Amino acid sequence: MTASALTRPGERERLPVKISQLDWRLVGLLCIVAFVGTAMLYSVAGGSWQPWAMNHAIRFGLLLVVMLGLAMLHPKWWFRAAYPLYGVLLLFVLMIEFTPLGYVAGGARNWLNLGFIRIQPAEFMKLGLVLALARWYHSHTAQEARWSWKLLIPTGMIAVPFLLVAKQPDLGSAMVIGLTGAAIMFFAGLSWRVIAAGAAAAVAVIPPFVMFGMHDYQRNRVLTLFNPEFDPSGAGYNIIQSKIALGSGGLLGKGYGLGSQSQLEFLPERQTDFIFSTVAEEFGFLGSFGVLACYIAIILIALRIASLAHSHFGRLAAAGMIAFFAVFVLVNGAMVMGLAPVVGVPMPLLSYGGSSMMTVMFGFGLILSTRVHRYAELPKGNSLI
């Protein structure tokens, strides 16, 4: 019998006991990935802490404290915040589209300018969506989650932010929102027949959507994926340079700070979208495999934490958080390898970016909270409002 099982329920609420229940393996792996990210940002800046590495390290340090603080929160507070947070974030996304506060950056109107700060609501929408879906499924039966007309509600909860974010246009964030929502419906027990029908519908819709529903530059990115050499100095440039960086690293890499693609600035967005290409160039196959191994370990540990939660809300919320983290890793990895179009999805904790790091760290705060309070039970229905 474990020590946690011998601990009386009242004692589990004491702070020292909560701290002892944290999964420090998970915390350590997150620190390792963030350290590698800081080191790579120092490298791509030509051996300088500015303009990226110092900010990256400071942000992670502050958010690490916030993450540990969130881990101390009882799941009932996450449960209570689910619907209000989803509503506020959806309002922010609508404000981008329908008010002058929407701010254009990188060719997409996906920032909200509040005067004293600029935020990217689509990043935080992923967090709100996970919590809202977990709360909805917590209050419904397994049969309703498997197949019922009530599934139109979570489908709509996913579709509305997906369509609004895609319209900005921010195809990368929209893709993460859609895939994360689909993963939660799968974890909740969605019927395999519905999954197969949805997959078939997606395959049927993608070609006409690419041809008629995308902007020209987005369509070029998708079509260039199959033949980047067709436009090597235009739409295919990013993928070609990334492949060169990946291949030139070989087994052991060129050495820290010696990557020609990043140091000579051939590699585009080397501090964000293509930071993993720099890892592969400077540390080779073994170095990039080591980073991916850390990601895989993080995902497996987090899934184990989700499986141990006693409440349905805790299981689904933790599984949903790790789902969007895994989507980040898979999409960015496929993107830099030329297996997916360039859609602006960062590699979590490795790439430079405050909004994405904040969302990831908040998500792991919830996952660790699920670990600390894994014996917590939440009532069915909407009694906690």
Image (cartoon, rainbow, N blue to C red):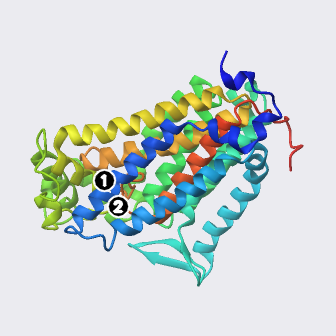
Residue 310 higher or lower than 91, as above or below: above
Q: Is residue 201 visible?
A: no
Q: Residue at x 34, y 55 (%)?
A: 37
Q: Is residue 350 visible?
A: yes
- Amino acid type of the residue that numbered disc 2 sits on in the rendered structure: Gln
Q: Position of residue 112 (x, y in %)?
A: 56, 75
Compared across the picture, whether 151 is left or right of 340 comes to right
Going by the numbered disc 1, the residue's amino acid type is: Val
Q: Tell me if mark 2 has few (under 14), some (14-19) or many (20+) residues whose alpha carbon lies within 10 angstroms of its own.
A: many
Tell me whether circle 1 and circle 2 mark residues in contact (CB < 8 Å): yes
Q: Nearer the viewer, residue 322 or 62?
A: 62
Residue 163: name its quadrant: bottom right
Residue at position x 23%, y 64% in the image: 44
* Residue 139 found in image quarter: top right
State the SS at label 2: helix
Position of 49 with respect to 368 (left or right) is: left
Q: Position of residue 234 (x, y in %)?
A: 18, 66
Q: Which mark is residue 218?
A: 2
| Image spot of residue 36 (x, y percent) | 32, 51
Q: Residue at x 24, y 45 (%)?
A: 337
- Residue 222: which numbered mark, if any? 1
